[in-house]
Image (cartoon, rainbow, N blue to C red):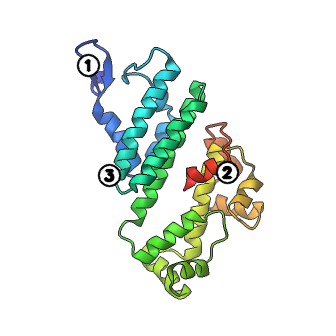
């Protein structure tokens, strides 16, 4: 009986469905930006666990596609409720649903799902981190995440926000407790994790993509930040064989 405590029985066909609380918890973890919880969910291949999710199609792949569309619809709306710009959330939803046209295997279906929930979760994490920040700091954040490919300096942020470089530096220390350069470096390294996990780009390509001075410098910073070399990180967490175009990757990160 304990095994069924998270499920509910449909009286018409006696199919056991997951209790809505279990699904709602997952969606809330996305909307709250809980990256660790969503990463764990993906690593456990929960999307492929069909116990209690209901059968929407007799074809296994089509069944997953239907459930994917339901998930995207719920997640996009929950993210709007939790602070994501409506147009951005729905545009992201459209992008992933349109991506279903290219899916022809269950493996690729799971990869798309994991990309989608990781993408939304990462964006919600940034939104929550920005909550309560001053307007200049929010503008700095927007600039940083829109220019991760470029070399970003305090002077760039100062000019963008019409403030002095010293004021911006002090703002980062006061509101975030880190230096501007440390924050920018961490943002680039976090984004590089996505490419290590979800693309086949080489280390030198990733280093160049985010404008690190060299591959060795990128590797050194990455290991200091994560405790793993980029190569070891990829070996441990690599979950797809998806090779995105630059447009796909920027959509994935932005």
C-alpha span from label 3 to label 1? 30 Å
Quadrant of the snapshot with the C terminus: bottom right
Pick the residue in front: 38 or 3. 38
Q: Which residue lies furthest to the top in this view?
A: 13
Residue 209 in view, yes or no: yes
Q: Is disc 1 surrounded by few (<14), some (14 to 19) or many (20+) residues within 10 Å?
A: some
Q: Which mark is residue 81?
A: 3
Q: Dividing the picture into quarters, in which one does residue 174 lie?
A: bottom left
Q: Position of residue 103 (x, y in %)?
A: 59, 29
Q: Closer to us: mark 2 or mark 1?
A: 2
Q: What element carries label 1?
A: strand
Q: Position of residue 23 (x, y in %)?
A: 34, 35
Q: What element carries label 2?
A: helix
Quadrant of the snapshot with the N terminus: top left
Instruction: Please give the name of the residue rendered at 76% of the width and 60% of the height, measured from the top-left corner.
Output: 215
Q: Which residue lies furthest to the left in this view?
A: 11
Q: Is mark 3 on a helix, strand or loop?
A: helix
Badge 3 or badge 1: first in the primary sequence? 1
> Vertically, is 143 above or below 89?
below
Q: Where is residue 18 in the image (x, y as percent from the top left)?
A: 32, 26
Judging by the rendered image, the residue that carries numbered circle 1 is 9
Q: Is disc 2 surrounded by few (<14), some (14 to 19) or many (20+) residues within 10 Å?
A: few
C-alpha span from label 2 to label 1? 46 Å
Judging by the rendered image, the residue that carries numbered circle 2 is 246
Q: Is disc 3 surrounded by few (<14), some (14 to 19) or many (20+) residues within 10 Å?
A: few
């Amino acid at each position: 009986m304990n095994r069924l405590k998270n499920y509910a029985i449909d009286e018409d066909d006696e199919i056991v469905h997951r209790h809505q609380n279990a699904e709602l918890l997952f969606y809330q973890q996305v909307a709250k930006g809980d990256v660790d919880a969503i990463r764990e969910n993906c690593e456990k291949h929960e999307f492929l666990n069909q116990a209690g999710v209901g059968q929407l199609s007799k074809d296994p792949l089509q069944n997953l596609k239907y459930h994917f569309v339901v998930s995207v619809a719920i997640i996009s709306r929950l993210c709007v409720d939790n602070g994501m710009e409506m147009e951005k959330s729905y545009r992201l939803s459209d992008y992933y649903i349109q991506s279903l046209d290219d899916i022809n295997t269950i493996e690729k279906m799971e990869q798309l799902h994991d990309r989608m929930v990781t993408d939304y979760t990462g964006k919600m994490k940034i939104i929550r981190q920005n909550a309560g920040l001053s307007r200049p700091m929010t503008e700095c954040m927007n600039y940083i995440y829109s220019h991760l490919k470029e070399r970003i300096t305090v002077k760039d942020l100062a000019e963008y926000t019409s403030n002095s470089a010293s004021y911006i530096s002090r703002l980062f220390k006061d509101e975030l407790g880190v230096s501007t350069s440390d924050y920018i470096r961490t943002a680039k390294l976090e984004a590089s994790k996505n490419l290590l996990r979800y693309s086949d780009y080489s280390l030198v390509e990733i280093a160049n993509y985010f404008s690190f001075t060299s591959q060795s410098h990128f590797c050194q910073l990455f290991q200091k930040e994560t405790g793993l070399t980029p190569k070891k990180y990829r070996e441990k967490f690599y979950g797809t064989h998806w090779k995105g175009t630059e447009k796909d990757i920027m959509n994935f990160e932005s």
